[in-house]
Image: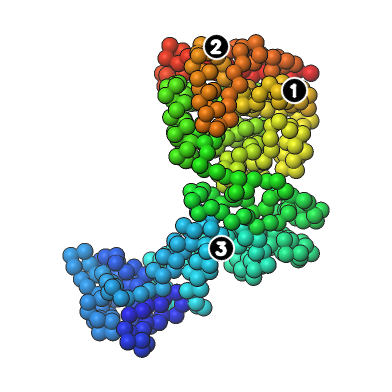
Amino acid sequence: MEFRVLGPLHVVADGGSPILVSQPLIRATICTLVVRAGHPLSPAELMELIWPKAPSPGALRTCVYDVRRLLGAERLVRDSSGYRFVLARADRTDVDAFRETAAAGERALARRRWQPAGALFAEALSLWRERSLRDLPDTGPAQELAAELVAERRRTRDALIEAKLALGRHDELIDLLTAKTAEEPLNERGWIELMLALYCSGRSAEAIQAYERVRCILMTDAGTEPGPHLRRIRCRIETDDPALICCPAPAPSTDVKASPPLPRLRRPGRATAADIDVSKPNIARMYDYFLGGKDNYAADRAAAEKIIAVAPQAPAVAHTNREFLRRAVRYLAETGIRQFIDVGSGLPTQENTHEVARRVAPGSRVVYVDNDPIVLTHSRALLCMDDRTVVIEADMRRPGDILEHPDVRCVIDWSKPVGILLTSVLHLICDEEKPGEIVAWFRDIMAPGGHIVLSHISAQDHAAAARRGAEVYRQVGATANTLRDRDQIMAFFAGFDLIPPGLVPLPDWRPDLGPAAAQIGRREKLPVWYLGGVGRKNS
């Protein structure tokens, strides 16, 4: 048999002829059983699903009899757990077909196979017909089932939008996004997607008209103006901002592992899926492995284990560096810093910069800067939750790109003090690239009261092991560390007043009190791998 409930109920017998179900109560019962196929339902649960009020005695028994007469007693069985709708091997339901096809689309999307993903999502959505779920009972429990299915449909629709945007098929999305905004008029994300699709289809005037429509809706129904993201998109469309260049994502390799989708709009030169080579170790993903994260691949883990073989303390050192960053950000927030730029931010983890800063000062604004494609993808997916947090692609060796980036200019006010975070990044820059000049550039554009937070690998206690570790980095093809002594690291603070206790081993910089914190980076167990400090610009 075939059961279709994603529309008016339609039942087809094994021979292909339709089965007429005329009674509304029986139609409602069959719809409910199909949606809950395989799940046991006690008599009380089944009655709550079907009848809005308690039925007369014997009503359930009569209803069950009628269903069995139409569909066969073997499909509606009763055991100790209650009633259960059992599908035969050859039976098909549009609910199962929708879910299986959408799941196949999600797998294709995770591998960035945009075209088959889009085709699968479109096929899944085509199973929904007009007057969807019309025959489900009008009861609270049944409508909850309907709401769950509608939510699945919306997620599939959004995934289809994502796949088509990645393919650059903006004109194909306009009708779909128009329907989405009609269905969810207060969802600003849908309006942003519609405006971008119109703009990328050469229909800028209509994109601005869409903004005016949503503004009117928000003012009338919610009593509020559009949010900052929506206003920013309008400004960029009006000025034909080059940041809104629309281009499809390249065809991916089928062996790329799952990770969040790449950004839909990119500037010329922005990293794409083709730039993500998971066969080679990557310093950010190795660091994630040291921290116990999951955003790493086999090549990263193998390389990290080689480092651990040379320096068993490497994971503890990574945690110590992260703890130093947390304490330093908290200190800056407590002293009044409300703007932060985290340069070389790495993969998101627990206690990210904006979370630490906003625990002290809820209005803090944070810019995350990186040039690694996987870091950017994960950061944009996990960190950009409001207009006070942005993730940009830039290389710290070209600090002017950071200053001039439009998102930075929207978030950071350079006339006020800024906290620049350079933790565990300067040793990735060799002397020929003049890291001291990079730090000086940030110092010179800072307003008085700005701070720099810096940590750097040191060979103070472990020169031989550090050299062996650096050699392993070179052997595995990851960015090699440039070892510097204390005086060389101290030189980066030229023009800053060092905050006490100065440039010290990371565990010694304003350590948290308490037995748990004291165990992190204890000097007797952990050699001095890193030195760190915080400097303040006074004039």
Residue drawn at point x = 47 percent, y = 14 percent: 527
Look at the numbered disc 1 and give the secondary structure of its residue: helix
Question: For mark 3, what is the residue?
Answer: 115
How far is mark 2 from mark 1, CA to CA? 24 Å
Q: Nearer the viewer, residue 97 or 73?
A: 97
Q: Earlier in the sequence, mark 2 or mark 3?
A: 3
Q: Nearer the viewer, residue 463 or 208?
A: 463
Q: Is residue 11 left or right of residue 321?
A: left
Quarter occupied by the N terminus: bottom left
Res 460 label: 2
Look at the numbered disc 2 and give the secondary structure of its residue: loop
Above or below 235: residue 390: above
Q: Position of residue 169 (x, y in %)?
A: 65, 64
Report if residue 221 is visible in the image. Answer: no
Quarter occupied by the C terminus: top right
Report if residue 298 is visible in the image. Answer: yes
Q: Is residue 422 left or right of residue 203?
A: left
Q: Is residue 409 left or right of residue 122?
A: right
Answer whether labels 1 and 3 touch (C-beta < 8 Å). Answer: no
Above or below 463: residue 292: below
Q: Amino acid at mark 2?
A: Gln
Q: Is residue 113 left or right of residue 181?
A: left
Q: Position of residue 192 (x, y in %)?
A: 67, 57
Look at the numbered disc 3 and give the secondary structure of its residue: helix
Q: Amino acid at mark 3?
A: Gln
